[in-house]
Image (cartoon, rainbow, N blue to C red):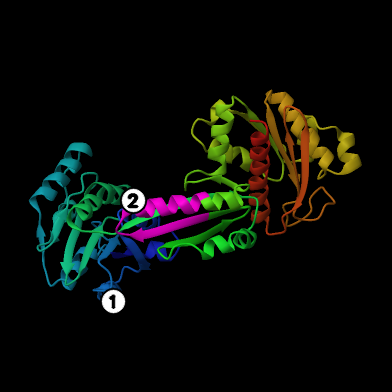
């Protein structure tokens, strides 16, 4: 089964807000075997909406529309629905009672005509009752396509998708199964990973597709299988993941979309009762932010100093001024001292330190732009590595963060 997702609103097209609704709906549909065929963002224009509806009719099974259900004049989705389906708006008693209770009971003010108009829906539609807001959803079918209109407010859309639409589709439609498996790899680029697994990829069953999802310092490999036999799909996915791990097991850190390296590291540190701290310069605290984004990170993350300026490295972190003078602020020697000082200060088993030139200018150091030194202090030694991550600035920072976490994980695995 195929779906199209259409977001309505000039505020999206001019970049005033970011469309998060489409991604949420696509994930929810994928879990129940409905494939998103395309996503569109269109303006608050009646003719544009009508033309979009016409172009999608009989092309997909479902058209999901978000936005344009508010009480103001620029919200025209309901009226456009009526024109497309040759219908008229009528007041729905159940929706009106809910709106009245919400406005007068919760907000403690008299209901206005504009509020009352929220209860107007096309007479032929199946109302999708919205318990968490005033705008109901609408379900209407024309020939082979179902048009589903949802409010643009994210939490209202999510409620209707999760509590109303997904259960309805599951109950009323026979759907194929879609099984995904994501393998998280760190430390090698997309092209190198592709070279290593070329033969394996060429021998995948026809019903299993592989997608490469690269980011600085890491590549996600997503396997997708579609078919009518769920058990067979899961079995074949598992067999191919096992054979893949024999080829690139050295760079695999997890086997799930949510099993990022920071999540894996958190589990390893907590399991072995180890702690970590960071002293960051060029990464500006992003390593600490990444580590603490994991729920429960207080069990192993003890703190950080963002010693961005040279004087902060000396006066707060305790780096020897002579070390900076002799070797430059961007050097292996400074990175090593930063790691040792934060490890001692925070009393942790491991400590990460970064110093480098993220660019676009050199700052206080003579090292080339893109140069980063990463130090990892362990219970037994300090490991320092030099990298040049190129440009632009954002790429340098992201790659440094990922490389630092990769170094930490490899060291933990050596000692467990």
* Residue located 17% across and 56% down the image: 172
Residue 74 in sight in this render: no
Q: In which quarter of the image is residue 314?
A: top right
Q: In the image, is residue 168 part of the stretch drawn in magenta?
A: no
Q: In the image, is residue 229 part of the stretch drawn in magenta?
A: yes
> As displayed, is residue 48 above or below residue 386?
below
* Residue where numbered disc 2 is placed: 231
Mark linked to residue 87: none
Foreground pick, 90 / 403:
403
Residue 265 in sight in this render: yes
User: Residue 358: percent from the left, percent from the top?
Assistant: 72, 52
Question: Which secondary structure lies at badge 1?
Answer: helix
Instruction: Mark 1: give few (<14), some (14-19) or many (20+) Cα within 10 Å.
Output: few
Foreground pick, 354 / 359:
354
* Residue located 67% across and 31% down the image: 415
User: Residue 165: percent from the left, percent from the top?
Assistant: 23, 53
> As displayed, is residue 280 above or below residue 53?
above
**Quadrant of the frame with the C terminus:** top right
* Residue located 77% across and 34% down the image: 382
Q: Is residue 377 left or right of residue 244?
A: right
User: Residue 328: percent from the left, percent from the top?
Assistant: 86, 44
Q: In this view, does 150 lie to the left or right of 387?
A: left
Measure how far apart labels 2 and 1 are at the Cα level: 37 Å
Mark linked to residue 55: 1
Query: Mark 2, mark 1: which one is toward the viewer?
Result: 2
Foreground pick, 364 / 239:
239
Which residues fall within the magenta stretch? 221-242
């Amino acid at each position: 089964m195929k779906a199209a997702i259409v977001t309505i609103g000039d505020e999206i097209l001019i970049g005033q807000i970011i469309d998060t609704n489409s991604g949420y709906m696509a994930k929810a549909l994928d879990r129940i075997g409905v494939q998103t065929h395309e996503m569109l963002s269109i303006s608050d224009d009646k003719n544009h909406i009508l033309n979009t509806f016409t172009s999608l009719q009989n092309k997909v099974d479902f058209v999901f529309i978000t936005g344009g259900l508010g009480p103001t004049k620029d919200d025209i989705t309901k009226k456009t629905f009526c024109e497309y389906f040759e219908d008229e708006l009528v007041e729905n008693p159940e929706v009106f009672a809910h709106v009245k209770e919400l406005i007068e009971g919760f907000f403690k003010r008299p209901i206005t005509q504009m509020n009352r108009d929220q209860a107007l829906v096309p007479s032929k539609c199946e109302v999708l009752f919205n318990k968490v807001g005033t705008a109901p959803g609408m379900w209407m079918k024309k020939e082979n396509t179902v048009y589903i209109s949802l409010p643009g407010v994210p939490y209202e859309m999510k409620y209707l998708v999760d509590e109303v639409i997904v259960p309805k589709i599951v109950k009323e439609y026979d759907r194929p199964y879609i099984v995904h498996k994501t393998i998280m790899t760190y430390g090698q680029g997309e092209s190198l990973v592709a070279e290593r697994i070329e033969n394996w990829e060429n021998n995948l069953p026809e019903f299993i597709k592989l997608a490469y999802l690269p980011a600085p310092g890491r590549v996600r490999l997503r396997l997708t299988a579609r078919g009518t036999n769920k058990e067979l799909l899961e079995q074949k996915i598992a067999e191919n993941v096992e054979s893949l791990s024999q080829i690139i097991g050295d760079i695999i850190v997890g086997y799930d979309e949510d099993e990022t390296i920071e999540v894996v590291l958190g589990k390893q540190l907590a399991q072995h009762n180890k702690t970590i701290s960071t002293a960051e310069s060029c990464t500006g605290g992003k390593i600490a932010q990444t580590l603490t984004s994991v729920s429960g990170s207080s069990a192993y993350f003890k703190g950080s100093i963002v010693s961005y300026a040279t004087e902060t490295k000396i006066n707060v972190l305790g780096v020897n001024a002579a070390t900076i003078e002799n070797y430059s602020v961007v050097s292996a020697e400074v990175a090593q001292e930063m790691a040792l000082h934060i490890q001692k200060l925070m009393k942790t088993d491991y400590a990460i330190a970064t110093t480098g030139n993220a660019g676009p200018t050199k700052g206080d150091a003579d090292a080339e732009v893109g140069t980063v030194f990463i130090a990892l202090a362990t219970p037994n030694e300090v490991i320092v590595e030099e990298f040049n991550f190129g440009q632009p600035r954002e790429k340098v920072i992201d790659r440094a963060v990922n490389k630092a976490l990769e170094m930490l994980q490899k060291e933990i695995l050596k000692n467990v």
